[in-house]
Image: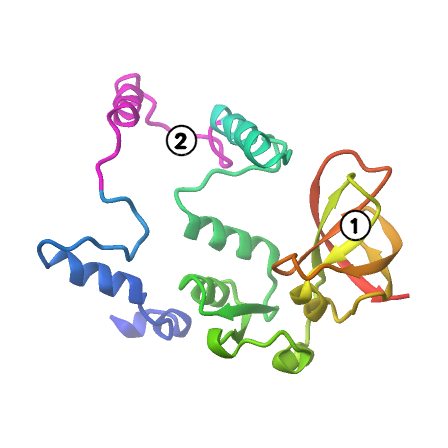
Amino acid sequence: MTKELSNKVINIKPSGIRKFFDLVNEMGDVISLGVGEPDFDTPWHVRDEGIYSLEKGKTFYTANSGLKELRNEISNYIKRKQGLEYNPKNEIVVTVGGSEAIDIGLRTIISKNDEVIIPEPSYVSYYPCAVLANAKPIIINLKGEKLNLNLHEFDELKELEIYDGAVVFKHDKDDKFTGGNYFCMIAKIKDGDEVIIKTANLEVKKKFVLDPNLKGTIARLGLSDFNGYNYEVARISKA
């Protein structure tokens, strides 16, 4: 049977989480924390809604992006909880789980042989999803006890053959361009640099301000003539 599978699939290792899950299921009096699901049954009011939908014949295909009513509710929830606005018509898609969303997202934006930076330890699906999308995974080993946010710890980033840009979070609260230490390493800039930020929709010149309290690889771009919030991929170069 193996010979009928692609080399790509054959070389992907089985999930360690799933191995642990199968092992725990054969044991008694053990609560498994492996797959991140609760140890109680789905609440009755949720099950009732599922049963009601079946009784009403709601068993057919939906739109590819999911039920319109559900996307509207997701949009409302994100706005209420996080203050972010996403259009349910073209900026929200419903999947059956997080792994499926990661897989769809990668296949949508990645071209063959694009390089994908994966910090480890990380979620086990990142690597196989990148491989299945025909990307080249670049593993950054973040050893917790030895982690040092100095550039020499990330020298391998300089070897990337492809750099598609950094993600910036646009907002209208101020007019600053700020980011944390990780963003500096990804974008190859430092505190005080004058940079040019180019996206599909704008081109601006800003002075970069380092904020050590900001985590991750996303920067904040304040725009006085911008209304709302939005994420966008940007090319960043020194002015």
Q: Report the quarter where the N terminus lies.
A: bottom left
Q: Quadrant of residue 78?
A: top right
Provide residue 137's location: percent of width, then percent of height: 53, 72
Label 1, on which residue?
200
Q: Nearer the viewer, residue 63 or 182?
A: 182
Provide residue 178's location: percent of width, then percent of height: 76, 55
Q: Quadrant of residue 45?
A: top left
| Horizontal side, residue 173 vs residue 83: left or right | right
Q: Which residues are magenta?
A: 40-67
> From mark 2 to mark 1, how far is it between C-alphas?
34 Å
Mark 1, residues whose alpha carbon is within 10 Å: few (<14), some, or many (≥20)? Answer: few
| Horizontal side, residue 99 vs residue 107: left or right | left
Q: Residue at x 78, y 34 (%)?
A: 227
Question: Which residue appears farthest toward the left when viewing the image?
Answer: 28
Callout 1: helix, strand or loop? loop
Label 2, on which residue?
61
Eyeballing the image, is 155 above or below 113? below
What is the count of numbered marks?
A: 2
Provide residue 199's location: percent of width, then percent of height: 79, 52
Badge nearest the viewer, 2 or 1: 1
User: As shown in the figure, which amino acid type bears the numbered disc 2?
Assistant: Tyr
- Is 113 colored magenta in this rendering? no
User: As shown in the figure, which amino acid type bears the numbered disc 1?
Assistant: Ala
Question: Which residue appears farthest toward the top when viewing the image?
Answer: 56
Q: Nearer the viewer, residue 239 or 151?
A: 151
- Is 57 colored magenta in this rendering? yes
Callout 2: helix, strand or loop? loop
Q: Residue at x 44, y 69 (%)?
A: 121
Q: Residue at x 30, y 62 (%)?
A: 17
